[in-house]
Amino acid sequence: MNFQEIKNRLKSRSIGIAGCGGLGSNAAVALARIGIGKLVIADFDKIEESNLNRQYFFYDQIGKYKAEALKENISKINPSVKVEAHTITLSPKEIVELYKDADIIIEAFDKAEMKEMIAETVLDSFPDKPLVCGVGLAGWGGNELIKVERHENLYIVGDLTNETGENDPPLAPRVGIVSNMMANVVLEILLGKDK
Amino acid sequence: MNIILNHRNEILDSEKDSLSVNELLKLKKFSFTRLIVKINGKLVKREFFDSASVKENDNVEIIHMISGG
């Protein structure tokens, strides 16, 4: 498939992204670059300087709401992508409302309890909708440990074991790998297997 | 009891014909607090961890959710 054919197939597709931090901002940009039709992004938070070690924002955006700033950045990369940005704390009710029409949902939260909440909500409310989760991305190195595990419509991407903490922070390279692998899983679902 | 746990055959050391999800987690010493459990492809919500049962030949998936993003 050439790139024009790929773009033609992606332009009618909508992806929900829950969280605009390290995983969400990078996965969103990857999908925007290749011409996804629509992104529905959501995050409650504002950009802090400490986020810039991995998240797709710029120094002059510190203090802005992440969802709005990400929308702005995507429009500079590929203005043909429709972006619906929500500054909101996602609960099960909002997840169902915002993502009911999405072809695929990307889980890009930070906290384990939020990851559990969205997985439970999506598997319960939309059992046929693919959900791609990022699990295990702390620290550096260990490229060979990062993988994709499939449980029917639930895809888990990451090393599955390394939780972030004071001495195992999330850093651009590993967060970038996991988020781009998540975007790559989305493509494989939408376009079919290539490799 | 024989089950499939995360795509692998697993022999559980239990005299019972069925186990609740919480009993299975305890038996397997799964200590992560945040997880998603599926039995035969179907989600088991946390509120049913004491009542949902795992039986012989069931396909059980237990996915740990850990922080970082």
Image (cartoon, rainbow, N blue to C red):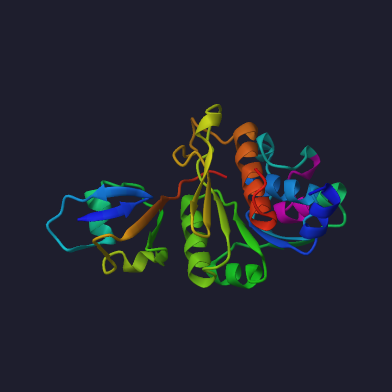
Residue at (78% x, 59% y) in the render? A9
The answer to whether B33 appears left or right of A18 in the picture is left
The answer to whether A177 appears left or right of B27 in the picture is right
Residue at (69% x, 37% y) in the render? A52
Residue at (32% x, 68% y) in the render? B48
Quadrant hosting residue B54: bottom left
Can you give x and y, in whole percent of width and height, for residue B23 in the image?
A: 23, 57
Quadrant hosting residue B59: bottom left
Residue A64 located within the stretch drawn in magenta: yes
| In the image, residue B65 above or below residue A101 | above
The answer to whether A140 appears left or right of B66 in the picture is right
Magenta highlight: main SS:
helix
Give the total number of marks visible in the rendering.
Answer: 0
- Image quadrant in which the C terminus of chain A is located: top right
Can you give x and y, in whole percent of width and height, for residue B12 in the image?
A: 21, 51
The answer to whether B68 appears left or right of A45 in the picture is left
Boundaries of the magenta span: A60-71
Residue A194 located within the stretch drawn in magenta: no
Residue at (49% x, 59% y) in the render? A152
